[in-house]
Amino acid sequence: MPPSAPSPDDVGALSALLPGVTDGVLPAACPSRTVLDHVTSKWGVLVIIALSDGTHRWSALRRVVQGVSEKMLAQTLRTLEADGLVHREARPVVPPHVEYRLTERGRGLAEHLLPLMGWIAQNADDIVAEAATR
């Protein structure tokens, strides 16, 4: 059975907390769902955080974002580039030299993600420990 539409009271309470935001992001057909999927994916967030300190070559990103496979790093970078968050610059040299950096939009996103990642780092041990006791 599909979920029922939110009541006016539900939407009103959220709109009061986030004026102008909830009307645009909560409906199922909102394009923000696609953006959220891209920028809040595990690897998407970590790549954006890694690039927040400047330009990196492919191999440097692989070292910084530990655990990411070549396939996932390539896919994540392509997605973030298509979304206008990452700029890719290939230099015509041998061996190939490709650098990645955040665009202005990507830097704006990183400004919001960095405090979230700080909160996660401060609370991760407690959250994982609590979840393990359940």
Image: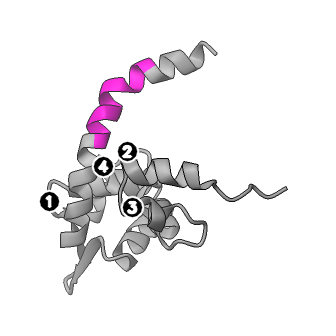
What stretch of residues is rendered in magenta? 116-126
Q: Nearer the viewer, residue 121 or 16?
A: 16
Up the image or down, 92 lies above or below 71; here it is below
Question: Is mark 3 in CB contact (under 8 Å) with mark 2?
Answer: no
What is the C-alpha distance between the residues marked 3 and 4? Answer: 37 Å
**Which numbered disc, 3 or 4, marks the residue closer to the eye?**
3
Residue at 22% in and 67% down: 102
Q: Nearer the viewer, mark 3 or mark 2?
A: 3
- Out of 62 and 50, give the one closest to the viewer: 50
The image quarter in which residue 67 lies? top left
Which residue is tagged 1?
Answer: 54
State the residue position of label 3.
21
Amino acid at circle 3: Val
Residue 69 picture location, percent across and down: 47, 55
* Quadrant of the rendered image containing residue 124: top left
| Marker disc for residue 66 | 2
Do the residues under discs 1 and 2 have CB atoms within 8 angstroms?
Answer: no
Where is mark 4, residue-wise? 63
Main SS, magenta residues: helix
Position of residue 61 in the picture relative to residue 75 (left or right) = left
Question: Toward the viewer: 125 or 71?
Answer: 125
**Image quarter hosting the N terminus:** bottom right
Tell me the distance, in whole angstroms, between the alpha carbons under discs 4 and 1: 15 Å
Mark 3 vs mark 2: which is more N-terminal? 3
Q: Is residue 81 left or right of residue 111?
A: right
Q: Earlier in the sequence, mark 1 or mark 3?
A: 3
Placement of 116 over or under 97, stated as above or below: above
